[in-house]
Image (spheres, grey):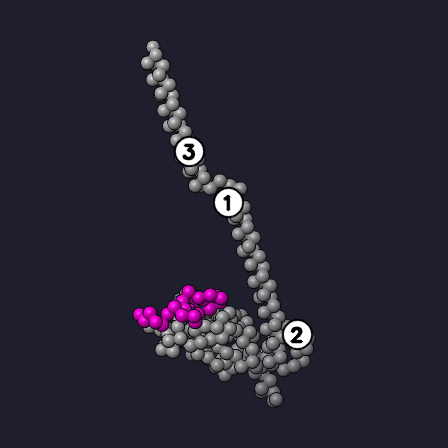
Amino acid sequence: MNKQDDKKRVTPKMRFPEFQTTLGWEASSVSKTCKSFSGGTPNTANKYFYGGKIPFIRSAEIALEKTELFLTEEGLNNSSAKMVNKGDVLVALYGANSGNVALSKIDGAINQAILCLQHQNNNAFLYHILSYNQEKIVNTYIQGGQGNLSGEIIKSIKLPFPSPKEQQKIADCLSSIDELINFREQKLAALKQHKKGLMQQLFPSHNDLQASKQASKQASKQASKQASKQASKQASKQ
C-alpha cells in the first residue's frame, strides 16, 4: 500500500490490543458495502392482501418484535413489499421516525418508508456505526428535523470500515452492552409495574372515594328517614 492510500485511512482513538498495529479504517460508501432495497404497500382496499401470517413492518416498528398489520402471501406477491430477515439493518426514511436505525428483530415484509441494508461482512457493525452517526445524518439531510430521507442519500453516505475481524470484535462488544441495557430496562419496567400495583393496594382509589361518599349519602338518607319515622310515631302517640 502506498502513502497516498494510507492517508485515506482513519484510526479511532481506542482500539482493541490485537488491532493496534493493523491498518487504519478505510472509508467506503454504503452502496459499495451493502445490498439495499425498499419495499411497498399492498392495496389496502383488497381484503385478501391483509390478515395473513407475514408481519408487515412499518417505519415506526423497525425496532419492535411485533407488528400491527400482517400480510398474506397473495398480498406480498402482488405488491412491491419485500421480505427482510431477522438481523438485517433497517433505516426509517419517512415521517417522524425518519433517520431511525435498527436491527430487525423479526422476519417480515417492509414498505416503501424503510430501507433494508445487508452488509457484506457484518450487519451488527453497520447498525452500530449508523446509530453513532444518526444525529449527524438527520441534521445534515433533514431540514429542521422535519422531512424525509431517501434510499439514495443513505447509500451515498461514506463510513469508515475496519477489517472484518475488527468489525466483529466491535460489534460483539457493543451488542453485549445493548443486551445488558435491554435487561436493565426490562427489570426497571417490571419494578415500576410492581410499584404501581403496590400503590393501588396501599392507597384508596378515586372510585373507592366516590363509593365511600355515595355510601355515606345513602346512610345519611336512611338515618334521616328513620328519624322522621320515629318523630311521626311520637307525634301520633301524643
Query: Does residue 229 belong to the magenta stretch?
Result: no
Residue 142 in view (yes/no): no
What residue occupies the far left of the structure in this picture?
45
User: For the residues carrying marks 1 and 3, which lies nearer the camera in this image?
Assistant: 3
Percent position of residue 95, x then y: 39, 67
* Magenta stretch holds residue 45: yes
Q: Residue 200 carries which label?
A: 1
Instruction: Give the Cα separation between the discs numbered 1 and 3.
Output: 21 Å
Q: Which residue is drawn at 40% across and 70% down?
A: 52
Q: What amino acid is labelled 3 in the image? A: Ala
**Magenta-colored span:** 44-70
**Alpha carbon distance from label 2 to label 3:** 71 Å
Q: What residue would you read off at disc 3?
A: 215
Label 1 sits on what residue type? Gln
Please state which amino acid type lies under the numbered disc 2.
Answer: Phe
For the N terminus, give its image quadrant: bottom right
